[in-house]
Image (tube, grey):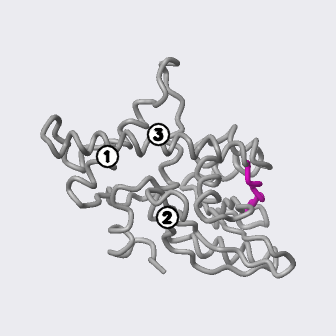
Amino acid sequence: MIKCKSPAWYTARIGKFTASNFGKIMSIPSNKNVVFSKTALNTIEKAAAQLYYNDYFEKGDNEASTWGQDNEVKALNEFCKRTGFRFEDAGFIQSAEIEDIGCTPDAYILDESTSEKLIAEVKCPFSSNNHKLYSRKISSKETLKEISPYYYWQTQGEMLVTGANNCYFISYDPRIKTDKNIHFVKIIKDEKAILFLQNKLKMAIEIRNKILKDFMVGVKMPKPLNKYW
């Protein structure tokens, strides 16, 4: 298993499109006559630059991301306490179908009552208001997409890469001292959405490869990796 944040994890991600960035690839462009938004094109060029430099850069953790990491296992333990399920680490997974994409689900979920392959995506919002919003508004894949397209494409993308049947979206806030501290929804795999995502990712890979070729022959030079957003 390639453990999250390990040196091997960073190496495995070089040049790949990962589920945490699928929302950027799928973001809707302001110009309706183009396929990819400026955010998507930045993500695509960044992947090409990673291959050019053979390196991976990630901005340092901030207070919000540290909070999320510190509470992720607590969230999974609480989820399992409520459901009777178990969880195990997943690590980085490379797609068997499209080798240039991958993901790091927060966990595999083990439900002994079903043969379904299940994963989990955990969010521990730094703002309690966000947790309360997710708890009120997210109850299905449709409402997840409405409230957070970014998380929708992340969960669908993780199911694409892993072959999971469903993904539990979990929001957790330990500052809430009642049973409202956790909210979880079983997000159903959307085959039409996954096919759409696959096609966009294949186009993104083609563009990445063209940009990399331009970098290699000097037609265009990449920015330093820390200059991509």
Q: Which amino acid does label 1 sit on?
A: Lys
Q: Do the residues labelled 3 and 1 touch (CB within 8 Å)?
A: no
Q: Quadrant of residue 176?
A: bottom right
Q: In the drawing, does residue 36 fall left or right of residue 186? A: left
Picture disc at residue 228 = none
Instruction: Give the CA separation, mark 3 to mark 1.
Output: 15 Å
In the rendering, at what x and y percent does residue 207 appear?
Answer: 37, 39
Residue at the image position 35 percent from the left and 43 percent from the top? 208
Could you say whether the residue bearing mark 1 is in a helix, strand or loop? Answer: helix
- Residue identifier under label 2: 67
- Residue identifier under label 3: 203
Does residue 175 lie above or below 46 as drawn? below
Instruction: Give the CA separation, mark 2 to mark 3.
Output: 35 Å
The residue range painted magenta reads 182-190
Q: Nearer the viewer, residue 94 or 81?
A: 94
Q: In the drawing, does residue 15 fall left or right of residue 113? A: left
Instruction: Give the CA separation, mark 1 to mark 2.
Output: 27 Å
